[in-house]
Image (cartoon, grey):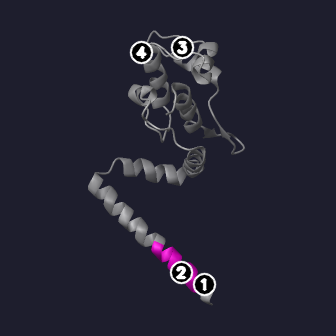
Amino acid sequence: MATLAERLNSWFADAATADAVGRHREPSTSEVAQAISEDPSHDVTISRSYLTALRNGSQTNPTVNVLSAIVKYFQGRDMTLPVSVSALVNEKAPAPAVEEKDEWAAALSDRQVRSIAMRAGRLTPGLREQLLSIMDVLDASKESAAGEDDDA
């Protein structure tokens, strides 16, 4: 079972963005604490040291207001993981494997991939199923073409 700290750290990793030279960079604990504290939509302030304690597991029982403020910060990011108070505190929700998070981060670092994902998210379930079928056909065509190149 994933702990609160593990789920919170998964969110930090999922919120990573490419920097000026293309390296993936997580938001720092200080940046997140400052952004939460400066958000005028709530009265929660959180110190870097308290957020660090939540991330390393030495603090395990934050208030609902603190959890809500953390969730609000991450909901404003381009995330692939579910972001809600229940997702953060639900001990039955498994954290994705590190390799899976790395694969997501690499795929989502591409602007076109993000654009496709965001547009697909606005489709009805039926249209998403059709889109997946189209993508399956494209994958099969690509594999078929690769096989023909190998035969030549």
Q: Is residue 52 above or below residue 104?
A: above
Q: Provide residue 39's location: percent of width, then percent of height.
A: 49, 16
The one of 20 and 134 positioned closer to us in this rendering? 134
* Rendering quarter of residue 129: bottom left
7 or 112, which lies in front? 7
Measure how far apart labels 1 and 3 are at the Cα level. Answer: 58 Å
Q: Magenta stretch?
A: 140-148
Q: Mark 2 to mark 3: distance in Å?
A: 54 Å
Vertical position of residue 139 compared to residue 108: above or below:
below
Mark 2 crowd level (few <14, some 14–19, many ≥20, 10 Å Cα): few
Instruction: Give the prevailing secondary structure in the magenta stretch.
Output: helix
- From the image, tell me which residue sits under label 2: 145
Labels 3 and 4: the sequence-earlier one: 3
Rendered view: 96 above or below 61: below
> Who comes first in sequence, dot 1 or dot 4?
4
- CA distance for labels 1 and 4: 58 Å
Residue 64, which numbered label? 4
Q: Which residue is mark 3?
A: 37
Residue drawn at x 69%, y 45% is: 22
60 left or right of 83?
right
Dot 2 or dot 4, earlier in sequence: 4
